[in-house]
Image (tube, rainbow, N blue to C red):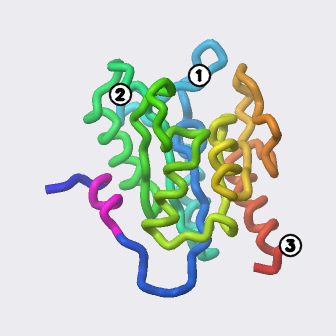
Amino acid sequence: MPGTLERKLQEKPSDGTTLKRAVFLDRDGVLNRAEVRGGKPHPPADAESMDFYPEAAGILARLKGEGFELVCVTNQPDVARGTRTLENVRAMNDRTLAELPLDALYVCLHDGKDGCGCRKPKPGMLVRGARERGIDLSRSFMVGDRAGDVGAGRAAGCVTVFIDRGYSEPQPDPPADYTAASLGEAARIITSHEREQGT
């Protein structure tokens, strides 16, 4: 019997003809606190140690109420590097889907040297999500806390929102369309942008 992650990935978009708007979200550092070591963010050790931002569920619920599809897209290269098991990643993603009102979650398990098309800053996970779930990327947003997230969103044609957590690593270059200090501020930027566009 497939786990929560597999069931979510098997879901198909509705048969309606209107493409949906979506908010794509990175996981570590956006939905849950990243473990910062040497100024660089890392995923939690396991599902039990995941620390979701207390406001995350409510913020996502409000975005869903605005009509957005909510899709998490996460790089987890430690599997390819042999320092983390696939079961570990699946358990963390299962918990993410169980605790937050997301519509789907996509994960890239490759290392940068693998040359895949899904590892951010490449847009593969966003493109796949759009294709499988009937999403209009040009009317969608990508929210992340690292330059790769912004790069993937830009490559997919989304509006990009960078959550600046103050890591000791390069900022997005070119910059994101918007910069925020938190997920809550990112959500306010998204709704304000939609009002300005008259959507």
Task: Characterize the local packing of mark 3: few (<14), some (14-19) or many (20 or more) Cα atoms within 10 angstroms.
Answer: few
Q: Provide the major secondary structure of the magenta segment.
A: helix
Q: Secondary structure at mark 2?
A: helix
* Residue type, mark 3 in image: Glu
Q: Secondary structure at mark 3?
A: helix
Q: Residue at x 32, y 52 (%)?
A: 5
- Confirm whether residue 93 shows in the render: yes
Q: Residue at x 54, y 68 (%)?
A: 69
Closer to the camera in the image, 157 or 145: 157
Residue behind mark 2: 79
Residue 181 higher or lower than 134, as above or below: above
Q: Secondary structure at mark 1?
A: strand
* Residue type, mark 2 in image: Val
Q: Residue at x 71, y 33 (%)?
A: 165
C-alpha span from label 1 to label 3: 36 Å
- Confirm whether residue 51 shows in the render: no
Marker disc for residue 101: none
Residue 69 higher or lower than 182, as above or below: below
Residue behind mark 1: 36
The x, y position of residue 113, in whole percent, is: 48, 24
Q: Are marks 1 and 3 in contact (CB under 8 Å)?
A: no
Task: Characterize the local packing of mark 1: few (<14), some (14-19) or many (20 or more) Cα atoms within 10 angstroms.
Answer: some
Left or right position of 149 against 92: right
C-alpha span from label 3 to label 2: 42 Å
Q: Choose mark 3 or mark 2, whichever is in front.
A: 2
Quadrant of the rendered image containing residue 147: top right
* Residue type, mark 1 in image: Val
Mark 3 or mark 2: whose residue is earlier in sequence: 2
Q: Which residues are magenta?
A: 5-11
Marker disc for residue 196: 3
Quadrant of the rendered image containing residue 126: bottom right
Q: Choose mark 1 or mark 2, whichever is in front.
A: 2
